[in-house]
Amino acid sequence: MSILNKYQNFYFIGIGGIGMSALARYFYANGKNVLGYDKTPTKLTAQIGFEGIDITFEDVIDEKIVALDKESTLVIYTPAIKKLGILDYFASESFEILKRAKVLGLITENTDCIAVAGTHGKTTTSTLIAHLCKEANLPSSAFLGGISENFKSNFDYNGNQFSVVEADEYDRSFLNLSPDWAVVTSIDADHLDIYGDRVQIEDGFRQFAALVPNDNQLFVRKGIAIGREHKTYAVNEEADYYSDNLRMDHDKIYFDFHTPTQEIEDFVWEIPGIHNVENATVALAILSNLGVDFNTLKKAIANFKGIKRRYTKHIFDNGKIYIDDYAHHPTELNAVIGSIKTFYPTKRLLVVFQPHLFSRTKDFAEDFARSLENGDDLLLLDIYPARELQENFEGITSTWLAEKIETENKEVCTLQETFEKIKEKDFDILLTVGAGNIDTLYDPIMEWMPNIEKVEL
């Protein structure tokens, strides 16, 4: 691969991002010198630092940066960072500087790339495909948008023949990829700050699908119009590949899987939700087409543990249940809350939600309101701004959103207030949900939940 051969040093600007850190781990696994900058220390930056990658949190031109030679150094940045002295320095010194998406695209040019796209479901699906590849001992590298509970990482390295990639639609990044195999899980409206409207985002996904050279290696959830020939997959309805006969027994889900020529009965796993069986269906479709036998796939599906913050569930001896999830779009909220209500219809649900981005909150306010009405109690945190500024979205606040939610048991609060407010609530199930820094509540909640007075199951 040319980029690996040319450079020995890789400097990441925004190294703590989920996509950036996976790339950093890839180059480190290939014996390169990897270092970088991020604004804020997190659990993820602490972990990759422990693994041996050098990280700074100060925007200063230190001796390690000065020592880098531009002929042997590639600088990789994320568009989320708008202004930085370190980036200005590399530009002024004529270092090669590439976006993360471009670098990932270069990697996929030289591998058999399996790319998973979709406004929802891509993290679970790509992580499951990566897990199945590893269990089948395929020589593969995985670049994931979440932390696999099996790998304990957003990256896995078992060779370079295959690459498993979460194909990000934000900023049209996925159009940099060279997919040999691809999945499209969904094309709901999202990132309207980039695309403008639903028509444009759907067109973006069609452009992505057009990158796949073989019709038989493009898998699209049934019902999505993708603009070219492809294989379909579904749950509880016939498609080229589909699953049916879903049943639940002691927190395990059983299902049967159908190919165009075979029916394989009794797959079993512990990941709840019909939407997750959909994700499993397309993963099985791809791996079976790669020649992996179904006995191997059955064992691999059974020991898949999921992804951190994707319906991470804990059941305590006192009868309380805690679920943590990354959902930050109304469709995702409906899926996770719907799953809880399906499996626990009589239990009282407290939803703690942190909206992500002022633009997304504005674009989908009515849909968010309808989704959040499905809990019994609601704590609504302040909007997590990420790359946006409140001054550019005057009046778009969590208080504004709360006014649209037609339920009495709602309250707006800051992240700092939230834990104490949770303690005051009466609930059977606690759901913390959102894509910002709401994950900082996880550890204190996990310490507190087992000590609550016992309730009847």
Image (tube, rainbow, N blue to C red):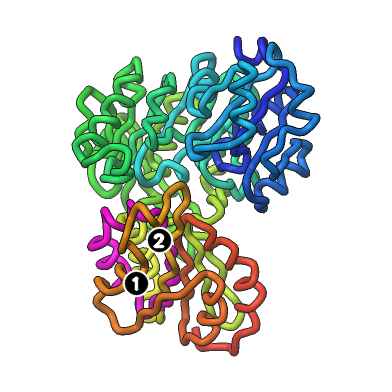
* Disc 2 target residue: 355
Q: Magenta stretch: residue 365 in it? A: yes
* x and y, in percent, of residue 114 in the image: 46, 27
Q: Amino acid at mark 1?
A: Thr
Q: Position of residue 363 (x, y in %)?
A: 26, 53
Residue occupying the point 41% across, 71% down: 380
Residue 132 appearing in the image: no
Spatial CA distance of label 1 from label 2 is 11 Å
Mark 1 or 2 closer to N-term?
A: 2
Q: Taking 344 as reference, is 153 above or below it?
A: above
Query: Where residue 339 sits in the image (x, y, percent)?
Result: 37, 64
Depth check: 22 or 151 in front? 22
Q: Residue at x 33, y 26 (%)?
A: 208
Tell me the crowding category of disc 2: few under 14, some 14 to 19, or many 20 or more residues within 10 angstroms, Cα based.
many
Q: Which residues are magenta?
A: 349-378
Nearest to viewer (mark 1 / mark 2)? 1
